[in-house]
Image: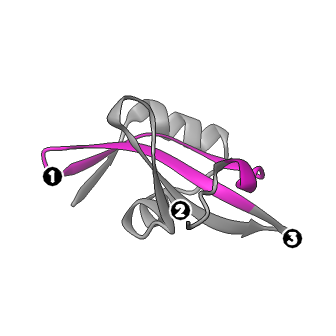
Amino acid sequence: MKITILPIARNKLTRRDIAIEWVTETVEKPTQIVSGYGGRQIAQRKYILGEKEYLLRVVYQEENMEIIVISAYLTSQIKKYWKEED
């Protein structure tokens, strides 16, 4: 499936110093997908930066066999967003 990163999302990635490769990897091989607002999905994957673990959250929506990345950000608040298996 084709992945398109919106220009505003690319700008945010640059400002947040997040590699585009991480975003595509997270969308293509997410560790977890959770529901977002307005029917959007959030792909999640953990990364280690320095000695600390972070969660990359990529907000996207699917349209016509295409994944459109809306936003992405790293957070250290993994427990807040990670959904444990029931």
When asked about the image quadrant of residue 15, the answer is top right
Residue at the image position 46 percent from the left and 66 percent from the top: 30
Residue 34 percent coordinates (x, y): 47, 51
Residue 69 percent coordinates (x, y): 39, 43
Label 2 amino acid?
Trp
Residue 4 percent coordinates (x, y): 31, 47
Q: How is the image coloured?
A: one colour
- According to the picture, the residue beneath numbered tag 3 turns out to be 51
State the residue in front, 63 or 12: 63
Within 10 angstroms of label 3, few (less than 14), some, or many (20 or more) residues?
few
In the rendered structure, which segment of residues is drawn in magenta? 54-80
Within 10 angstroms of label 1, few (less than 14), some, or many (20 or more) residues?
few
Label 3 amino acid?
Glu
State the residue in front, 28 or 36: 36
- According to the picture, the residue beneath numbered tag 2 turns out to be 22
- According to the picture, the residue beneath numbered tag 1 turns out to be 65
